[in-house]
Image (cartoon, rainbow, N blue to C red):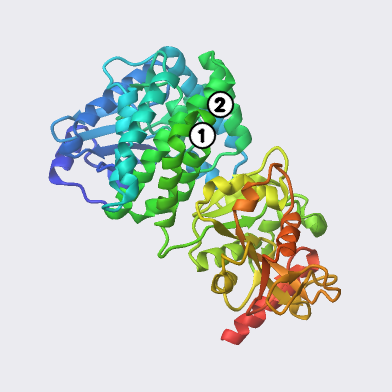
Amino acid sequence: MTTLSPEARTFLDRMGWGMAKPSPVAGDASARSYTRLHLSDNYSAVFMQTPKSEIQSQAAFCDVSAYLRGLGVSAPTVLGEDAVSGFLLVEDFGDQTYSAILDQGLTREVELYRTAHDVLAVLARTGAMGGLPILAASELARLTAVTFEELPEGHALKCEQVTFQNDLQGLATWILRGVPVTVLRDFHAGNLIWLANRTGLQRTGVIDFQDALCGPKGYDLVSLIDDARRDLSIELRTTLIRDHAHILNISEDDMILRTSLLSLQRNFRILGLFRRLARTGKPVYLRHMPRVAAHVLRAVDHPRLAPLAATARAICAHYLQSTADHAPRGAMILAAGFGTRMGALTKATPKPLLPVAGRALIDHALDVAQGEHAAPCVINTHFHADQMRHHLRNHEVILSEEQPEILDSGGGIRHALRYFSDSAIFTLNSDNVWTGQNPFATLSAAWRPTEMDALMLLIPRDQATGRQGDGDLGLDATGRVLFDDPKKPYVFTGAQILKTAPIAAMDIPKFGLRMLWETFAREGRLFGVIHLGGWADVGHPEGITAAEDLLAMEKAAVT
């Protein structure tokens, strides 16, 4: 039950809302609190309480709200205010946030984001609201300090702060030059409300703008398309960047550079902010760290941002690894394929989302990665990538979307290398299930990096549930893989440890892993280890039943 203070009750009585029934509203990262007040089933308002330490933001909310409504943008009307006590009563836009709608499915994603972009187009064409604080290049650089401050005491990367900030300021001064605009600052799916009873751009309700600034064009676009809490399709992201370039009358290349720099700055800062929030009692923010780091790593790939690249990548590596319980190694789950052997089952559904024992195949693969605290965990997607994004929206993973074409196993890993800092990673096929010892634990125990370029997890052919056809390979007495063994007594289970350097050295974008394995085998650096448990191949329809039988046997044995 929501309890209001006597002072709050007095204010609401004065505003004619004293008899309203209160109910809680989800808060944000600030110290403000929110309460929904119901005078009737069809009439409500939101009561905001701002602590004295942030009281100046209340006046800013009122001013910016009036400014936005003057431009035809839907911002809450202020119904009542007590500036001394920090009380504010505003119009209730409801709870149909973009995030809530998209959590139900992605069919309206394009409509929602295009309408939000219409709001940004108005702001870009209008210029900046008067009286706002200025977000200059020096301030953009200063704001990244929190990410260095949240590093452990004595960490070597702390020494890079001055150089990083100086380089960032210099790049921002040149790249972000031009007439500034009103920057709402947190313009993302969680702060946008869909107002279905309105028309045009007014269908997008904006609710979080009390920290608005006068700043560079494109900042709010980056807030929208590189959201810390939600993945956007590459196609839609590219379209919105191109449309914004047209609005600003600049080239698409210049817009890509601008958004890359702004995304780097914004998400680099968020890494530190989320770490601080987690450290001070809000650990839920840690689940977003992989996505935030992925935004930084994609941005820093732009060649013009090379002076920032080494430090940014090292910072991301630290923050990604420190979210695990103990020192992990990254994992890549391969899930981009078409699943053609599944026939009609994968006509409208990607194979990783097919149910096996009541859970999607990809969830069984995630059990393996999460069971050994692998971080980061990267999943590549291509076929029905929107369905994969929707299914994985609440998981601590990075999605590496391959468009316009699929890159095959090796090319997919190469495409995702930006997300890994270790010299070796786990890779895992998503169309298998395992029982017994965690595959990653078995591989870790047998890994000898001075001798190996890759270590494959194998199972004897006669124990390979659901396998159709012969085995894949043999082993010699030292555990080295033999592709020319005529008996081929072992099957590759889809799990391995793989060094990243040979992948990075490939100069073609699309290739399979087999060519690398054969090279490693000729050099005596490809090894195999036997899985201590059961395994099922779910690459064909019959494999589903076989896998479910295997899992049922394990469950029965445990009980």
The kind of secondary structure element at disc 1 is helix
Residue 384 appears left or right of 72: right
Residue 197 versus residue 449: which sits nearer the camera? Answer: 449
Instruction: Name the element at disc 2.
Output: helix
Q: Quadrant of the C terminus?
A: bottom right
**Which badge, 2 or 1, is on the more N-terminal residue?**
1
Q: Residue at x 27, y 38 (%)?
A: 47
**Residue visible at 76% across and 60% down in the picture:** 518
Task: Give the image quarter of residue 185.
Answer: top left
| Quarter-of-image position of residue 325 | bottom left
- For disc 2, the marked residue is 241
Verify CB contact (< 8 Å) between mark 2 and mark 1.
yes
What residue is pinned by disc 1? Answer: 225
Q: Amino acid at mark 2?
A: Ile
164 in relation to 125, above or below? below
**Which residue is at 29% across, 14% downward?**
130
- Horizontal and vertical percent for residue 475? 74, 75
Q: Where residue 81 sits in the image (x, y, percent)? A: 21, 29
How many marks are shown on the rendered structure? Answer: 2
Location of residue 463 in the rendering, given as x and y in whole percent from the top left corner: 74, 80
